[in-house]
């Protein structure tokens, strides 16, 4: 059993499932920046982050991690007999349009799993319109995902599909206020399982964000609503 299936089996709540999607499976598209680091936190002690570094030209590396927060071991009677943490680390190496992934999973005690997979990216830009096609995680014990991402004058629309599981879309708009300040608004259907009432949960899945530029640095903060579960908070620093 790999970590993804293990975590899904632990909780009826979709929080862990979508924290994995948010951090691991959405990192398809190689950024054009030199360096990027981001950190996000969920409720229940779950946190995740990413680090990207452009070595030179079309060669780059991406590191993603997820920590489940404290989880409890129980015996057959339901008594707590200990605690543990689960971790997921994904290392990606980019070379032109190809991508090599190394996945490391650690859960329970002395349970480790190491998997390899590959992906491919094709990007085309026509004036102000940019489109990216991709497939990713073609390997053993990894979900095969297909995706397409488009960007035009601040509007970004992305679609992805995990084979035999779920279709996900995301719509984002970047609103320039000044040369040093941008606002962001986005929506994704990824968090539909979080909704408990159609009348109350109209904001679930929406994200509001702000980005401040200083010389070659960009510092951003985003917050996404998750109905009664709370919020996802993300801080990101980019060096162009």
Image (cartoon, grey):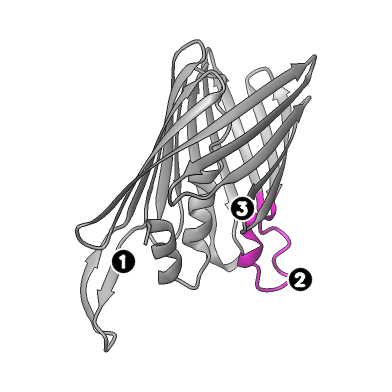
Observer-nearest of 29 and 33: 29
Residues drawn in magenta: 188-206
- Badge 2 is on which residue? 199
Task: Identify whether 22 is placed above or below 227.
Answer: above
Identify the secondary structure beneath mark 2: loop
Is residue 189 a member of the stretch shown in magenta? Answer: yes
Specify the quadrant of the image occupied by residue 131: top right
* Mark 2 or 3, closer to the camera: 3
Which label sits on residue 71?
1
Question: Mark 3 or 1, which is nearer the eye?
Answer: 3
What residue sits right under mark 3 in the picture?
163
Badges 2 and 1: C-beta atoms under 8 Å apart? no
Q: Is residue 6 left or right of residue 113?
A: right
Report the number of discs. 3
Instruction: Answer few, some or many: residues within 10 Å of disc 2's Cα (few below 14, many 20 plus, some between 14 and 19).
Output: few
Q: Secondary structure at mark 1?
A: strand
């Amino acid at each position: 059993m790999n970590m993804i299936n293990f975590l899904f089996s632990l909780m009826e709540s979709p929080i862990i499932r979508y924290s994995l999607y948010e951090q691991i499976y959405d990192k398809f598209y190689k950024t054009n920046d030199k360096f990027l680091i981001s950190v996000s936190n969920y409720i229940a002690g779950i946190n995740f982050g990413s680090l990207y570094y452009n070595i030179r030209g079309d060669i780059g590396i991406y590191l993603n991690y997820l920590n489940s927060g404290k989880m409890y071991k129980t015996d057959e009677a339901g008594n707590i007999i200990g605690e543990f943490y689960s971790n997921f680390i994904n290392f990606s190496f980019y070379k032109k349009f190809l991508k090599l992934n190394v996945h490391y999973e650690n859960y329970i005690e002395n349970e480790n799993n190491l998997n390899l997979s590959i992906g491919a990216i094709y990007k085309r830009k026509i004036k102000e319109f940019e489109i990216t096609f991709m497939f990713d995680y073609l390997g053993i014990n990894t979900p095969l995902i297909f995706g397409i991402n488009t960007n035009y004058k601040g509007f970004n629309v992305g679609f992805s599909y995990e084979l035999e599981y779920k279709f996900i879309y995301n719509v984002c708009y970047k609103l320039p206020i000044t040369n040093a300040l941008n606002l962001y608004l986005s929506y994704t259907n990824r968090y539909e399982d979080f909704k408990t009432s159609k009348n109350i949960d109209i904001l679930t899945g929406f994200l509001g964000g702000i980005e401040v530029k200083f010389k070659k640095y960009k510092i951003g903060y985003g917050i996404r609503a998750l109905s009664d579960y709370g919020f996802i908070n993300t801080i990101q620093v980019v060096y162009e």
